[in-house]
Amino acid sequence: MTLHIHPSTESTLPAWLTMRAKLFDDEDPALLEEEVRQISNDGTLKSQPFKCLLAFEDDTPIGFIELTIRSSAEECMTSPVLYIEGWYVDPAHQGKGIGRAMMDAAFAWGRGHGCREAASDARPDNTGSINAHHALGFADAGVIHCFRRSIEGSSPPTA
């Protein structure tokens, strides 16, 4: 096996989208694709520098890591902060150091943008991701519940 990690390009877009749909399997694939197209147009996500790195075994895409530079993140003491927005390794290739290699490449990109810390998140029930983060030296920064609600047109229900 020869592992290569490269930035996403127009030619790798289909592979990135396929893997992204697997990672974010509860999201609308059309919205995921639209977000990637917007990112690809200007290299930012919500006005933050963005980079997607893809891992290949020989010529086969087997993982990706999506990165932004944020001004802050939970429990981080420095700014800017490298933020891991998405991190995926094909299940058949997990446990072989591919996630670590992608994370090392991510850290290098972050250092190039002046970052001294990295932050990430995982859903509380995603023990595989939590364990992978711990194995790479990430420490828990707390568990939060995030909420959203449309505010168009109606009042909130009364309790």
Image (spheres, grey):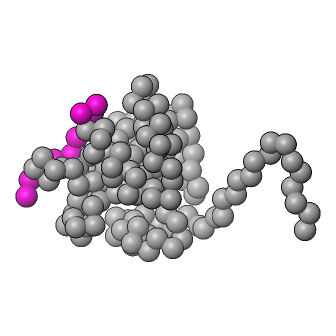
**Residue name at image x 28 percent, y 31 percent:** 10
Front residue (pair 75, 39): 39
Q: Is residue 105 above or below residue 7?
A: below
Farthest-out residue, top: 42
**Residue name at image x 24 percent, y 33 percent:** 11
Q: Is residue 41 above or below residue 136?
A: above
**Residue name at image x 22 percent, y 40 percent:** 6
Farthest-out residue, right: 158
Residue 159 visible in the displayed image: yes
**Residue name at image x 33 percent, y 52 percent:** 19
Front residue (pair 64, 154): 154
Please state the extent of the stretch shown in magenta in the rendering: 1-11
| Residue 7 covered by magenta stretch | yes
Give x and y (percent) for residue 40.
Answer: 39, 30
Residue 75's quadrant in the figure?
bottom right
| Residue 88 covered by magenta stretch | no
Q: Is residue 59 above or below residue 130?
A: above
* Count of numbered labels shown in the rendering: 0
Give x and y (percent) for residue 101.
Answer: 24, 55
Locate the C terminus and report the quarter of the image it occupies: bottom right
